[in-house]
Amino acid sequence: MELTTLSLGVLASGEGTNLQAVIDACAGGEIPARVAMVISDREGSGALRRAGKAGIERHFVDRSRFPGKEDFESKIVSLLREAGVELVLLAGYMRLVGRAFVAAFPQRIMNIHPSLLPAFPGLESVRQALAYGVKVTGVTVHFVDEGLDTGPIIVQEPVVVREGEDETSLLERVHRVEHALYPRAIRLFAEGKLQVEDRIVKVEAGT
Ligand code: GRF
């Protein structure tokens, strides 16, 4: 199947290892996409550094310079639109996305989360999972709605917790799964294999 190149915009606040995995998957031809723009709400974040290294257009958008969340997000939406972004990826973006932002990219914003949602939404999910004593946790990629990690689930991958495992070890294994799963979800989207009905995402067979 001949595929056109999907334009991605990535929002990240932190280290950017998921961003890096997506950049590498694009460069390696694993997904028919390119990262057109990286936006961060943290100056000097690892994500912005990685974007610079890869020669990707990057912006630091400072929340404190905007009177409200809507103005802040409308700046982000216009940057993404100017760059022709078709799919927005949240990759360690530490803010809840507002209604106007979601409406600007309907079913076109994805997030990656380090647990099997709906278990352990929010922050420090790996720590939460360990403290709860689950035997299996994992990774979820989902479409973004206005809730906290509540949008329609696209793909999930389990990670079995080892007996006596500490947070550092489990975090590392979860991250490794993330770095493979995000490209997989993007590829499904790029190939037009995802259909959303209410909150159910149907994934076309043969993938
Ligand atoms: C990842 O664990 C992701 O699932 C969560 O935030 C973390 C970001 O890590 N949403 P990185 O910045 O991609 O390294």
Image (spheres, grey):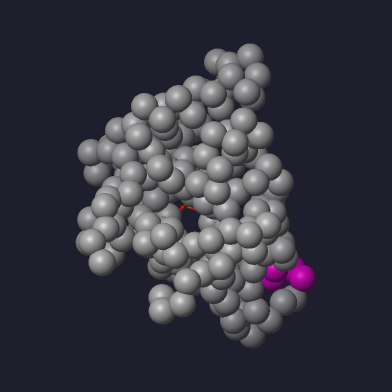
Observer-nearest of 196 and 67: 196
In this rendering, position of residue 71 left or right of residue 130: left
Residue at image coords 59%, 38%: 102
Q: Position of residue 11 (x, y in %)?
A: 47, 40
Q: Position of residue 169 (x, y in %)?
A: 53, 71
Looking at the rendering, in which quadrant would you find the N terminus?
bottom left
Residue 33 visible in the picture: yes
Residue at image coords 26%, 52%: 4
Observer-nearest of 24 and 100: 100
Observer-nearest of 122 and 152: 152
Residue at image coords 56%, 67%: 202
Q: What are the residue bounds of the magenta stretch?
A: 128-132
Q: Position of residue 187 (x, y in %)?
A: 38, 62
Main SS of residues in magenta: helix
How many numbered markers are drawn? 0
Residue 124 visible in the picture: no
> Which quadrant of the figure has residue 64?
top right
Residue lying farthest bottom? 163
Magenta stretch holds residue 44: no
Observer-nearest of 15 and 23: 23
* 207 is higher (above) or lower (below) than 89: below
Magenta stretch holds residue 130: yes
> Which quadrant of the figure has residue 54?
top left
